[in-house]
Image (cartoon, rainbow, N blue to C red):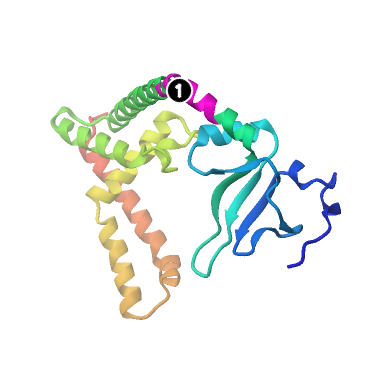
Amino acid sequence: MACKSLDMVANGDPTAEHLEVYDTKSGLWHPELGELTQPDGWSFLPAGDAFVTRRVKAAGVYWVLFRPKGRREHRRQLGLLAPADAIASAQIEADTTASRREHERVANTRQRDKNEATYRSEFVDAVMQWLNFSSEHAAMASEIARGATDRAAVVGSGRVGRTKTLTLEDRAALAARAFIRHRYTDYEDQLSSLELTAFDQDIDADIIEVGEYPEIKQAAHRAVDAFLDEHRKPD
């Protein structure tokens, strides 16, 4: 592609823009500006050091350098092209603050671990309270509470144990019901039967699910209710 006029850049100077530039076999290339030349006094900062990259970006001017997508891969970010003095300054700051940042990282990790342990403990307690099992079923209640917590409260999973739109009590109830449904009812066997039926009869699984899945789900809910009634303390 021929190099287009730099009038497309607001002030006529591409170094003042945060461009996404591709490292091609014939040199640097931009989808709108065409072929570009690495500005004098600029250097390449490889991707990988988040602190240095943030500092260079904060300094003001840079281009993000990509490897063009290939036949079997997406484009890949290689790093930044930016003024050499900005990169050098960021690297010096990284070196001089490394010890402090490592200390903060360790402290933050410990605090996150502590907060996570506290939350999981509170979640287990909430499930135990919601189950309200009789004393002879205490071991089972503990197993359900811990299993439901392990399943629903995985960090970054997006599962019910991580939602912010429900109370802890509601999260615990939904997590417990889901765990009981999968562990103590024939719900999973019924789902497997649906999948086998679709495969054996060459039927679209979505069609079967629309017709039969709601019934299986409702039957599982009833089974969970019966399971809870059987193990809870008498009213």
Is residue 199 part of the magenta span, yes or no? no
Residue 22, picture quadrant? bottom right
Classify 10 Å Cα crowding around label 1: few (below 14), some (14-19), many (20 and above). Answer: few
Name the element at disc 1: helix
Q: 4 left or right of 208?
A: right
Quadrant holding the N terminus:
bottom right
The residue located at (76%, 57%) in the rendering is 33
The residue located at (42%, 34%) in the rendering is 170
Residue 40 pos. (x, y %) = 70, 44
Q: Which residue is mark 1?
A: 101
Residue 78 pos. (x, y %) = 54, 50
Q: 8 left or right of 167?
A: right
Residue 75 pos. (x, y %) = 56, 58
- The region drawn magenta spans 91-102
Q: Amino acid at mark 1?
A: Arg
Residue 211 pos. (x, y %) = 43, 68
Marker count (numbered): 1
Quadrant holding the C terminus:
top left
Is residue 100 part of the magenta span, yes or no? yes
Residue 57, picture quadrant? top right
Q: Main secondary structure of the magenta part?
A: helix
